[in-house]
């Protein structure tokens, strides 16, 4: 009887753990800085055959933008992202989706040791800022 009770308790614990477990998300990131290294951009991508932008964080001077409410800065939403293998485009909008807050454009350069991306970010009507990035 004790064996049956112990076995039933084990199955119950396993079933409970299975229902509470969340699937792991395989991610990679692209990290960018401006040419003076005083600003940064972090783009988190979900793994898969096509880029799936999960989050974007931008710190440019006094401005901070984020697609995640848990981080400091103005919360923005991703309007669109597109990667044709040569040019990666990300547009960020305000929360009401009435205006584009930032445009990120990255060119991809293939190298055996480490892929690199170069491009620019433009926040609202400010002049574009050149950036270099590392990541897939």
Image (spheres, grey):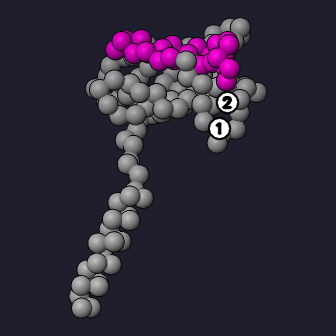
Judge the density around disc 2: few (<14), some (14-19), many (≥20) Cα neighbours within 10 Å.
some
Q: Which mark is residue 69?
A: 1
- Answer whether residue 113 is magenta in the image: no
Q: For the magenta stretch, what is the residue range?
A: 80-105
**How far across and how far down the image is residue 129, in percent?**
62, 14
Q: Can see residue 67? A: yes
Q: Is label 1 in a helix, a strand or a loop?
A: loop
- Whole-Å distance between the Cαs marked 2 and 1? 6 Å
Residue 35, can we see it? no
In the rendering, at what x and y percent does residue 30 appear?
Answer: 46, 29
Query: Do tag 2 and tag 1 residues touch (Cβ < 8 Å)?
Result: yes
Q: Residue at x 39, y 15 (%)?
A: 83
| Quarter-of-image position of residue 13 | bottom left
Q: Nearer the viewer, residue 77 or 90?
A: 77
Residue 87 located within the stretch drawn in magenta: yes
**Occupied quadrant, residue 69:** top right
For label 2, the residue is 75
Residue shown at 51% from the left, 21% from the top:
132
- SS for tag 2? strand
Is residue 4 depicted above or below 131 in this figure? below
Using the image as rendered, state which of residue 39 and residue 45 is in the foreground. 45
| Residue drawn at point x = 36 percent, y = 12 percent | 84
Q: Main secondary structure of the magenta part?
A: strand
């Amino acid at each position: 009887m004790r064996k049956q009770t112990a076995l039933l308790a084990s199955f119950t614990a396993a079933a409970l753990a299975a229902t509470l477990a969340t699937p792991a998300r395989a991610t990679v990131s692209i990290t960018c800085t401006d040419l003076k290294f005083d600003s940064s951009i972090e783009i988190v991508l979900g793994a898969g055959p096509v880029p799936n932008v999960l989050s974007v964080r931008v710190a440019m001077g006094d401005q901070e933008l984020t697609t995640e409410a848990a981080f400091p800065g103005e919360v923005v939403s991703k309007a669109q992202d597109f990667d044709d293998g040569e040019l990666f485009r990300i547009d960020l909008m305000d929360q009401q989706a009435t205006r584009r807050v930032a445009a990120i454009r990255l060119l991809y350069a293939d190298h055996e040791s480490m892929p690199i991306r170069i491009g620019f970010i433009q926040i609202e009507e400010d002049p574009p800022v050149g950036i270099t990035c590392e990541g897939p």
